[in-house]
Amino acid sequence: MLKLSITLSLLLCIVAINAQTTPNTCNYSFSYLDFNLGPFTNQSYGIGLSESESIYLSVCGPNPYCTEMLGYDVSFCSDSESGVVDLGVPSTGVFSRYGKSIGKPGIILTTQSKGLCSGNTPYTSKTIMQCKQGAASTIYRGEFTSECEVSVYLYGNAACPGQ
């Protein structure tokens, strides 16, 4: 009976930790900081990387444009003259802490694509969300940091702890 009790307690801890770090719940906790990313639910963001390429993403779930164009749940994609490419699916998403400054907290959402980039490597996308009190959620930069990795930076009140 004691083993069963310990096993159940451990299982509940694992579930609680997972609920705090995956985008399915849109919540993330680190140390004493709690982030409620609910304001990102059903929000779609886009940014042009060049005249011929744009990136579309959603933080909490699939992006409507990416999903419609590719026919399956996609949270992060690029659209260029060569077509729409899956850069990340929601089921692979993991939240982590951004930066080490207590005064400027932030979060990173990392996802991977269903398809492969080059060789046997999936695309990796990073959505870096920085807290900016009172500001609307706004993308201010996007870039391919390597052939198979893209980063998008956004700031806003929704990325602040306790919101």
Image (spheres, rainbow, N blue to C red):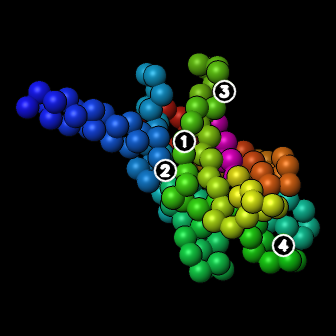
Which callout, 3 or 4, points at the residue further toward the start of the chain? Answer: 4
Reading the image, the residue beneath label 1 is 95
Looking at the rendering, the stretch of residues picked out in magenta corresponds to 125-132
Residue found 70% across the figure and 52% down from its top: 125
Reading the image, the residue beneath label 3 is 99
Dominant secondary structure (helix, strand or loop) of the stretch shown in magenta: strand
Marks 4 & 2, CB-CB < 8 Å contact: no
Q: Is 9 placed left or right of 87 in the picture?
A: left
Marks 3/1: CA–CA distance: 13 Å
Which callout, 2 or 3, points at the residue further toward the start of the chain? Answer: 2
Marks 3/4: CA–CA distance: 31 Å
Marks 2/1: CA–CA distance: 7 Å
In this rendering, the label closer to the viewer, 3 or 1: 1
Reading the image, the residue beneath label 4 is 80
On the image, the x and y values in percent for residue 123 come to 73, 57
Which callout, 4 or 2, points at the residue further toward the start of the chain? Answer: 2
